[in-house]
Image: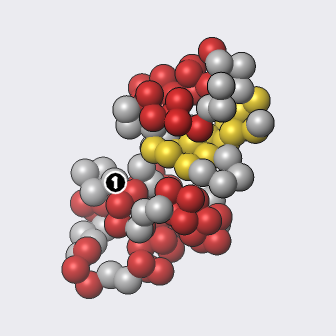
Amino acid sequence: MSISIFHNPRCSKSRQSLEILEKNGVNTKVILYLQCPPSASELKKILKKLKMSPLDIVRKGESRFKELAISLENISEEELITLMVKNPILIERPIIFDENRAVIGRPPENTLNLIDF
C-alpha cells in the first residue's frame, strides 16, 4: 500500500500525520505541495476522494486569503480551485490519500483511517 501526503513541514498537524504513517510502516510519498502545487485536475480528484467541495478545504483564516479579499459568495468552484492551485498555502493541510480514499489530518489521528491494519 502506498499513501501520499500533501505535507508542510512547518505545520505541526502535518508532521504528526506523517509520523503516524512512518510509525505504522506505511510506504509514504511526501509531496511538499507549497513547492510543487497540485494541478487543477489533481485537486479535483482529491476533492472527490475526500467527498468535499473546494470551499471545504480552503483555508479561510490564512493571511493570503485575506490579502486576496476573496468573496466566497461570488466565486465558482472552478475559480476557487484555480485560486488554490496558484496559492497552495490556501489548501487545508495535511491531506493524506491513496488510490481511492483521502482524509484531512485534522486531527492527525484521521490518518489512521487510511491505514489497512
* Residue 2 placement: quadrant: top right
Q: Position of residue 16 (x, y in %)?
A: 48, 23
In the image, residue 71 above or below residue 14: below
- Is 12 on the left-hand or right-hand side of 74? right
Q: Nearer the viewer, residue 9 or 95?
A: 95
* Residue projecting furthest to the front: 117
Q: Residue at x 26, y 84 (%)?
A: 74
Any part of residue 51 in sight: yes
Q: Quadrant of the C terminus?
A: top right
Q: Quadrant of the N terminus?
A: top right
Q: Residue at x 71, y 52 (%)?
A: 99
Q: Position of residue 80 (x, y in %)?
A: 41, 73
Any part of residue 33 in sight: no
The residue that mark 1 highlights is 59
Image color mode: secondary structure
The amino acid beneath tag 1 is Arg
- Is 115 on the left-hand or right-hand side of 105? right
Q: SS for tag 1? A: loop
In the image, residue 78 above or below residue 115: below
Task: Sort mark 1 into few (<14), some (14-19) or many (20+) by Cα contacts within 10 Å.
Answer: some
* Residue 32 placement: quadrant: top right
Q: Nearer the viewer, residue 17 or 67?
A: 17
- Is 8 on the left-hand or right-hand side of 58? right
Q: Residue at x 30, y 50 (%)?
A: 62
